[in-house]
Image (spheres, rainbow, N blue to C red):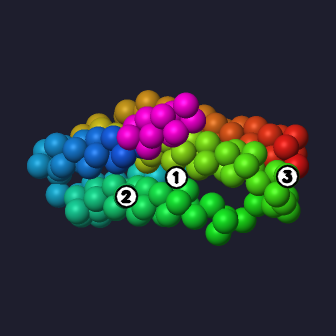
Amino acid sequence: MENIIFTAFDIFNFGLVVFFWWFTLKHYKTLPKRIPVHFDFDGKADNFGSKIYSFVTPVIGTALFCFFVYALRHPETANFPVEITENNRYAQFLIMEVFIRWLFVLIMLIFMNSQDYMFRYSFDENVKPKVPLSTAILSVIGSLIVVFIFVAIFK
């Protein structure tokens, strides 16, 4: 059962990467020659670049996907907050596998939200991100807290 869930999770994560590339390619032609590539804490663009920079986050997302797939295939190479013993090996690897997959979803959603905001901001400086960056960062921090609690429980 766990393999079926992990396979579904992996297909979903790969689908996020494909969707991200599709979204970028779909909007690329309509972008102006200069687009915002960096925003300050108030959400205002403070650096602009060529529209080719719209491919930076999909490339980073794809590289992260490859890195996470490698980490999932070789869990012994990961850095765990507790010592791995024969008694806790299965539980710790399971926690790591779930967390890595969940973390990738969060990272891709943050990337896609920022890409969407960058594209919309290119045409209207008064738009707001669909999900505030503070909410996205708090979701990652909250996930870290939960995983550390589980790791401590199953030492």
Looking at the rendering, the stretch of residues picked out in magenta corresponds to: 1-12
- Tell me the crowding category of disc 1: few under 14, some 14 to 19, or many 20 or more residues within 10 angstroms, Cα based: few
Kindly identify the amino acid type of the residue bearing the numbered disc 1: Asp
**Count of numbered tags:** 3
Relative to 60, residue 127 above or below: above
| Relative to 18, 132 lies left or right | right
Tag in front: 1 or 2: 2
On whether residue 11 falls in the magenta region, the answer is yes
Which residue is rendered at x = 45% and y = 40% of the image?
7
Give coordinates of residue 51: x percent, y percent: 22, 58
The Cα atoms of the two marked residues, 3 and 1, are separated by 47 Å
Provide the residue designation for mark 1.
40
Q: Residue furthest bottom?
A: 77
Which dot marks residue 62? 2
Mark 3 or mark 2: name the one nearer the start of the chain: 2
Give coordinates of residue 1: x percent, y percent: 55, 31
Kindly identify the amino acid type of the residue bearing the numbered disc 2: Thr
Relative to 1, residue 149 above or below: below
On whether residue 118 falls in the magenta region, the answer is no
Please state which of residues 1 and 24 is positioned toward the viewer in this rendering: 1
| Relative to 11, 25 lies left or right | left
Provide the residue designation for mark 3.
87
Tag in front: 3 or 2: 3
The Cα atoms of the two marked residues, 1 and 2, are separated by 25 Å
Tag in front: 3 or 1: 3
- Tell me the crowding category of disc 3: few under 14, some 14 to 19, or many 20 or more residues within 10 angstroms, Cα based: few
**Visible residue check, residue 104:** yes
Give coordinates of residue 45: x percent, y percent: 41, 51
Which residue is rendered at x = 16% and y = 43% of the image?
26
The Cα atoms of the two marked residues, 3 and 2, are separated by 35 Å
